[in-house]
Amino acid sequence: MDNERQIALEARFDTILPTLATKADIEALRADIHKWMVGSMIGLFIGFGGLAAALGQLLKPPLPAAPVAVQAQPIPQPAPAPPTQAPPTIIINIPPLK
């Protein structure tokens, strides 16, 4: 029985062993993951940079508005009174003193 079990295990190992990853496979996987991580980090930095720029524009204090110039309306002057007639001139003749 021990021999049969050993043959069964060897057959099982012979079918599984070629499918296991080798050191080269692990290194290739590690390089692919490294490239993906670097790309993700660059994307995150660009994304957060854009977000920071957008928030900076949103939170920037508004420029002071130009002062509003209000034209004052001229005060209407009362119409000048129509010219009145001057009182008649009084002439007094005083004889000269002798």
Image (spheres, rainbow, N blue to C red):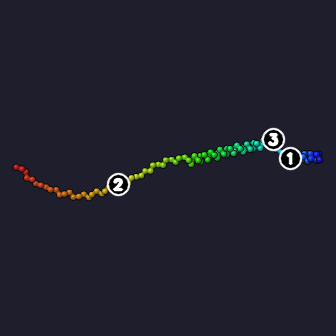
Q: What amino acid is found at the position of numbered circle 1 in the picture?
A: Ile
Q: Mark 3 belongs to which amino acid?
A: Lys
Asked which secondary structure carries label 3, the reply is helix
Residue 64 appears in the figure = yes
The residues tagged by marks 2 and 1 sit, at their Cα atoms, a distance apart of: 105 Å
Of 51 and 84, the residue lying toward us: 51
In x, y percent, where is residue 65?
A: 48, 49
Q: Position of residue 7 (x, y in %)?
A: 92, 46
- Number of other residues with Cα within 10 Å of mark 3, as a class: few under 14, some 14 to 19, many 20 or more: few
Residue 72, percent from left and from top? 39, 52
- The image quarter containing residue 3 is top right
Query: Which of the two labelled residues, at mark 3 and mark 1, occupies the earlier sequence position?
Result: 1
Tell me the element at label 2.
loop
Q: Residue at x 16, y 56 (%)?
A: 89
Sequence-first disc among 3 and 2: 3
Q: Residue at x 95, y 47 (%)?
A: 1
**Amino acid, disc 2:** Ile
Mark 3 touches mark 1? (CB < 8 Å): no
Give the labeled residue for mark 2.
75
Q: Which mark is residue 79?
A: none
In this view, the residue farthest toward the left is: 98
Question: Which residue: 78% across, 41% down?
Answer: 27
Which dot marks residue 23?
Answer: 3
Between residue 97 and residue 48, name the one nearer to us. Answer: 48
Q: Which residue is mark 1?
A: 16
